[in-house]
Image: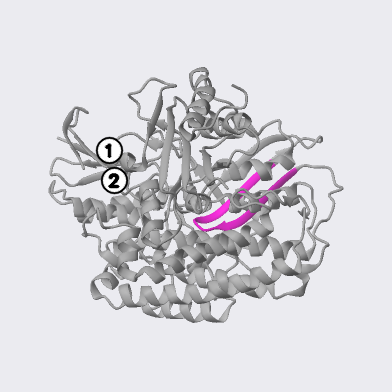
Amino acid sequence: MAVKKVVIGLGNPILSDDGFGIFAAREVECRLPAGAPVDVVEASLAGLKLLDFLLGYREAVIIDSVKTGSGRVGEIYCFTPEALRETVRLASVHDLNLATTLELGRMLNLPVPEQVTIFAVEVADNTTFGEGCCREVAAAIPQVAEQVLVHLGIESATG
Amino acid sequence: MKRKISLNPVTRLEGHGKIEIFLDQQGNVANAYLQVPELRGFEKFCEGRPAEEMARIMPRICGVCPEAHHLASVKALDALWQVEPPRPAKLLREIMCCAHFIHSHTAHFYVLAAPDFLLGPDADPARRNILGVVGKVGLETGREILKHRRYAQDIQAIIGGKATHPVTGLPGGLSKGITPGEREEILSKGKSCVEFARASLQIFEDAVLQNKRYLDLITGDVYRLESYSMGLVDDSNRLSFYDGNIRVVDQEGREFAKFAPGDYLQHVAERVEEWTYVKFPYLKNVGWRGFTDGKTSGIYRCGPLARINVTEGMATPAAREAYEKMVDTFGGKPIQATLAYHWARLVELLYAAERLVELAEDDAVLDPNVRALPTAEPGEGVGVVEAPRGTLIHHYRADREGMITGVNLIVGTTGNHAAINLSIRRAAEKLIRNGKVSRELLNMVEMVFRAYDPCLACATHSLPGRTPLEIKIYDSRGNLQERLWQ
């Protein structure tokens, strides 16, 4: 039996561009061929709560939004939690950042994924309640979904 | 020349926050402000939607306290349809509420508060985090922390229907009850949480109360604020998370007001300041006197310490003991030392666990009668619960078709907003002198902020792309004079 992988879409689906991760995860799910060894999860949370979703998987992909302020809206980034750690110290916008969460899991001998990859897109508005992303961010949804499938070595069911 | 110091964002906070400190010509603190990002359009988003959808939309405000919003929301809907939920539904909702407190208080104490006390406020920032805490308390305790946080999450999922964003609350009750097997799971996990809460208080006793430096920090004047306190109490004025009347006590611990949640507008007003979009609730019958404390200032505090102050006792035995020890240590109430919020949070952790077990032991929780159907015409409703961060008020208005026409929310962190600003200024005044600004001093300012467990996550969870801690110093004309970052 193939080793299970997980794709986690992070974001708030009623906060404009912040919903990107959720929408992209839904797109991944649509494109997954039947029987693919991948679970898709939508989550509006972070830190320790995120750890619950990561445990037990060998590999995880997290889809999120990012606001560097210097990138082009809709630009796609791909990086690892270690890269993130360089930029956010051990502080976090929530209770724990991802790198620290994973390190805590490893420290406590919990089954954290060996490989975690983050796909994020530069967003414009993540503070206005509303359904749906702006045009540039929406355009990145199918692109990121495809990149995630390629990354996981899975051929798209619709492609 | 005035200097402006900006800390952006404060570390280990839930959500983005920026503290700006303005210095006078002598380099002493003239003013300090907490800037939080504004969330736009929530009321507009809700208007025109069916009222019953509120219970599922409100938890989406953020991922930190969805259960508290769900509960306040269904209580507002009960009131809006004038429907009284059957007792089994109330018991189950309160169990969910207690589990939410266990989850939130555990995460706050170990992840956000403990680094400052178990490792020290001046410890290397690279170590001052949960990993450092686990290094100090040991791997076994580390696993217990995660296990019990998970237990609380599991209990919320049993009653709420799913792990993070509960869906079972409806006007008049719940969409489902629980099975005998689920009740056993709640009981066994709840009992384990009682022991975990006791152990957490012991860790606090050993690491903080037995350490004179920390005890002085917690009980000392640096972080003291003479404010009113607000929280929910039951008929005997004991602590209550899920239901009851809102009680306000003054600076001498005397009852200033006690009112039904639906009457909140007669007691609470909201101040608007030009430098922030976030409002400042205050006691209407005292009045707004600016950012100052004392009897003539309507600024109140809510959350764990305020709840200790408004209550005349704990309804469960072990929590009562922990509460009395805390009150004795301070020589009576009200307790106004802000860092005592951390201690109060652990007393509440024990109460939440004990209360959860007590509720689950009631056989009525297995009664399938968990819903009373609303039959009245919809109108207006206020729902109040205690959230981990303070009194949470949801207020909805609907038209005859049950469509939302107005929404007003006062969340715990907003309730504390004025007090947080005042606390930051007080701490900064004492810790920044003659322009001397060291990292430890800045961290001490952050410490007082964290004591309130402010949740700004409602704003956004997006990954920050910049270095998080940034200090900016401006001259009086607003020109950037110096920029420091980590």
Residue at 42% over, 21% down: A73
Q: Which residue is mark 1?
A: B467
Residue at 48% over, 73% down: B196
Question: In this picture, which residue range is highlighted in magenta?
Answer: B380-396
Q: Is residue B42 visible?
A: yes
Q: Is residue B326 left or right of residue B432?
A: right
Residue at 41% over, 44% down: A115
For the residue labelled by badge 2, is the local secondary structure a helix, a strand or a loop? Answer: loop
The answer to whether residue B220 is above or below residue B485 is below
Query: Badge 2 sits on which subunit?
Result: A
For the residue labelled by badge 1, is the local secondary structure a helix, a strand or a loop? Answer: loop
In x, y percent, where is residue B369?
A: 83, 62
Where does the N terminus of chain B fall, quadrant-wise?
Answer: top left
Residue A89 badge: 2
Name the amino acid type tagged 1: Thr
In x, y percent, where is residue A143?
A: 50, 22
Residue at 57% over, 34% down: A13
